Image: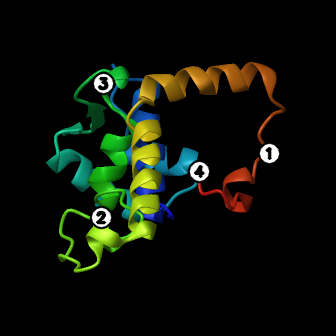
Amino acid sequence: MKISTKGRYALRLMMEFARQPEQVTRLKDAAAKQELSEKYLEQIVAVLSKAGFVKSIRGAQGGYLLTRAPKDYSVGDILRLTEGNMAPVVCLGQDSVACDLAERCVSRSVFSRIESAVNEVIDHITLADLLQEEQTLATTAAPIPEDAHRRCQGGH
């Protein structure tokens, strides 16, 4: 299973908002800090806003705010909003077509367990957890190179 650019960027954007949950974050600033396209983030923030994850503040000092505390957003919430369900195969998805082999399909059982394991992980990690991990890494890891976002293949 691969998380799309939209899902990865949505998580990064939500982290930007979570770093200062009481302050308005301008999309332009988040895009610059994350080295992401502001136009693409506009599309993502529209989805986040429509779902009630963030609210828009208008005006010269406008931007976006989380609607809840960082501890109240799971990674699973964010990824499902942008990716849909996290089923690794079509036959497990919410819109799956009935399969005549489903009751006897051994591989379906494997994929079902994979889906359960993924959901277990992403549903139990919150933005607050990621902020805590980020703080820990900031004190223990080597500094991040200037061009790290461009070179990173992991898509953070």
Amino acid on which the number 4 mark rests in the picture: His
Amino acid on which the number 2 mark rests in the picture: Leu
Specify few, some or many for label 1: CA neighbours under 10 Å numbering under 14, 14-19, or 20 or more.
few
Q: Who is closer to the viewer here, 19 or 24?
A: 19
Between discs 4 and 3, the one toward the N terminus: 3
Please provide percent x and percent y for residue 60: 27, 38
Residue highlighted by disc 4: 156
Q: Which mark is residue 92?
A: 2
Q: Who is closer to the viewer here, 107 or 56?
A: 107
**How far is the residue under mark 4 from the one under mark 3?**
21 Å
Residue 38 in view here: no
Q: Who is closer to the viewer here, 139 or 123?
A: 123
Amino acid on which the number 3 mark rests in the picture: Asp
Q: Residue at x 31, y 21 (%)?
A: 69
Specify few, some or many for label 2: CA neighbours under 10 Å numbering under 14, 14-19, or 20 or more.
some
Question: In what element is the residue under mark 4?
Answer: loop
The reply to whether discs 4 and 3 touch (Cβ–Cβ < 8 Å) is: no
Please provide percent x and percent y for residue 15: 46, 36
Residue highlighted by disc 1: 145
**How far is the residue under mark 2 from the one under mark 4?**
27 Å
Q: Which mark is residue 128?
A: none
Residue highlighted by disc 3: 72
Residue 77 lies in what quarter of the image? top left
Question: In what element is the residue under mark 3?
Answer: helix
Question: In what element is the residue under mark 1?
Answer: loop
Q: Residue at x 37, y 71 (%)?
A: 105
Question: In what element is the residue under mark 2?
Answer: helix
Between discs 2 and 3, the one toward the N terminus: 3
The answer to whether 104 is drawn above or below residue 146 in the figure is below
The answer to whether 65 is drawn above or below residue 38 in the figure is above
Specify few, some or many for label 3: CA neighbours under 10 Å numbering under 14, 14-19, or 20 or more.
few
Between discs 1 and 3, the one toward the N terminus: 3
